[in-house]
Amino acid sequence: MGLRGKLGLIFLLVSALAILVLCVAVYTQAQSARLDRTRSFADERIQLAAQNYDTNDVPVLGAKLDDPDLPPQLREAVLEGKRATFKTGSPRAKMWAAVGVKDGKILSIEQDYETSDDSMKALQQALVLGGFGTVALVALVSVILAGSLSRRIVAVAGTARRIAAGDLDASAAEAVGKGKDEVQSLAAALDTMASSLRGQLEAERRFTADVAHDLRTPVTGLTTAAELLPAGRPSELVRDRAKVLRRLVEDLLEIARFDSGVEQADLELVGLGAFVGSAVGRLRMQQALPPDSVVVHQLGPDVTVSTDSRRVERILANLIVNGLRHGAPPVEVTVTGRTVEVVDHGNGYPEELIAEGPRRFRSGMAERGVGHGLGLTIAAGHAKVLGAELTFGASAGGGGGALARLVLPAGPETEP
């Protein structure tokens, strides 16, 4: 049951209980008032009958002297010198009134007392109809109010999901509308959190871009100077570290471009299966990889897709290099329709990366080796520009390993 149903049910139960208590109280009060009126009437009759008897020695108004049916409780009260009334119960309710008169006798009268006369029946009917009508009205109002509250909370939840998806300009306060209740406070707090997060991300983006830009010139000079060193093992180590540092700066610049949102895909028609095969061949040549280190499989007919081939090749290169560096060969690349899967035979991706996606400068588990954690981040950035879906998981094969699945978007120009 959703929040709307729960709130509506709570309002209905509380209102029904309150109306029930109110109806019982009104009916009980009406019965008490009727009983008081009947007692007062019987007391007035016995007073008139006693006055007439004391004057004329004749009982009037149906009064009787020393009635044998007089209730014992009433008889005792009269013998104590009181004028009293008493209501008897079943089988037929009656109202008695008695008083002591001259010669030590007891004068009493009795009258029928129906517990439910026409007026009380009418009151019962009015209370029942009014109670059900009020409960129905309260139920309708509670459903409307609960629905309004539920819609506002759902609007806040929807805004939170948009923020989690990267839309930091989404406003929860605008989604829930005007108000001064707790939902509005929740929306304002969510907007404040999004604003703070937006500021932190912007500061991180500027820091990354500034660092990469400022390092580019000295790193280029360092690489050039390293090439001028005399041959030898120390020179090789310097040149190797200089190249690593240069790749790191280039990766940071690329990430900074993703953060700025200026990257756009240059679409073209590409036969995906054939393109993946040629891209893997170029990667083998560039990285001097053994032929059996990367294996390409084509399942089903080749599919022509509208995409940016340069970005697709960069994604594949990063996924394959990551598998070779942190996993174990062979890395298997399987093309099925618009889907490309890259599987290695290592220890697999860490659970945190599978659940949350790649993060910069987080290389994963120690058993998958060390690194800067930028390769998968860049691959995810290119996939986002393409509008593709890049997910990470565990291989379903018996050997385990890490699985990266790239699903290119289906466009009007996609053909089998």
Image: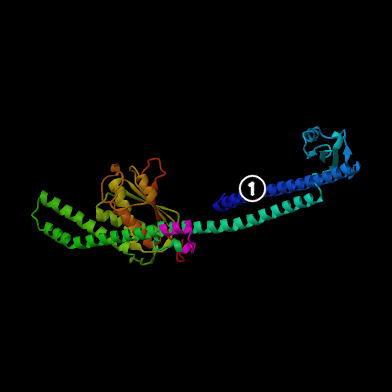
For the residue marked with disc 1, what is the amino acid?
Answer: Leu
Q: Is residue 313 left or right of residue 116?
A: left
Q: Is residue 397 left or right of residue 6?
A: left
Q: Which residue is mark 1?
A: 17
In front of the other: 101 or 409: 101
In the rendered image, the residue lying farthest to the left is 230
Task: Name the quadrant containing residue 278.
Answer: bottom left
- Looking at the rendering, the stretch of residues picked out in magenta corresponds to 174-189
Residue 212 percent across, percent down from the top left:
23, 60
Most prominent secondary structure in the magenta stretch? helix
Residue 129 percent across, percent down from the top left:
73, 53
Q: Residue at x 91, y 43 (%)?
A: 56
In front of the other: 205 or 122: 122
In front of the other: 200 or 10: 10
SS at circle 1: helix
Q: Is residue 139 left or right of residue 162?
A: right
